[in-house]
Amino acid sequence: MSIETVRSALLWCSVIDYALLLLWVVIVIWAHDWLFRLNSRWFRLSVEQFDAMQYGGIVLFKLGILLFNVVPLIALYLVR
């Protein structure tokens, strides 16, 4: 596998992951009450706990994108 192929794959992975992240944020913002009601059927959560879990998940996912997609992509462009 060539470096160009890996670069292309990492670029597309980053784009797709950021699109999923954006979708997650939009759903949490626009459908917050519905999402909370859906999750509170299964788990005992206060609104504050639900918001904290969503925020933590979004932050963790964003860090994962940066660490596993964007940083290696930048490194591959730098060694060009």
Image (cartoon, rainbow, N blue to C red):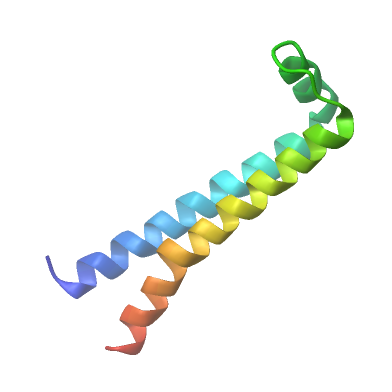
What residue is rendered at 37% in x and 72% in y? 72
User: x and y percent of residue 67 in the render?
Assistant: 47, 66
Rendered-image quadrant of the N terminus: bottom left
Q: Is residue 12 left or right of residue 34?
A: left
The answer to which quarter of the image holds residue 34 is top right
In percent of width and height, residue 42 lies at 69, 13
Residue 78 spot, x, y in % from top left = 35, 88
Q: Residue furthest bottom?
A: 79
Rendered view: 8 above or below 31 = below
**In the picture shown, does residue 51 fall above or below 21?**
above
Mark count: 0
Task: Name the residue: 64% across, 44% down.
Answer: 57
- Extreme top residue here? 41
Q: Residue furthest front?
A: 44
Left or right side of 26 for 64: left
At x 63% / y 41%, what residue is drawn? Answer: 23
Quarter of the rendering containing residue 76: bottom left
Q: Is residue 7 left or right of residue 21?
A: left
Image quarter in which the C terminus is found: bottom left
**Is residue 53 depicted above or below 75 in this figure?**
above
- In percent of width and height, residue 63 lies at 56, 60
Q: Which of these two is toward me, 55 or 79?
A: 55
Drawn side of residue 14 relative to residue 8, left or right:
right
- Name which residue lies at 29% across and 89% down: 79
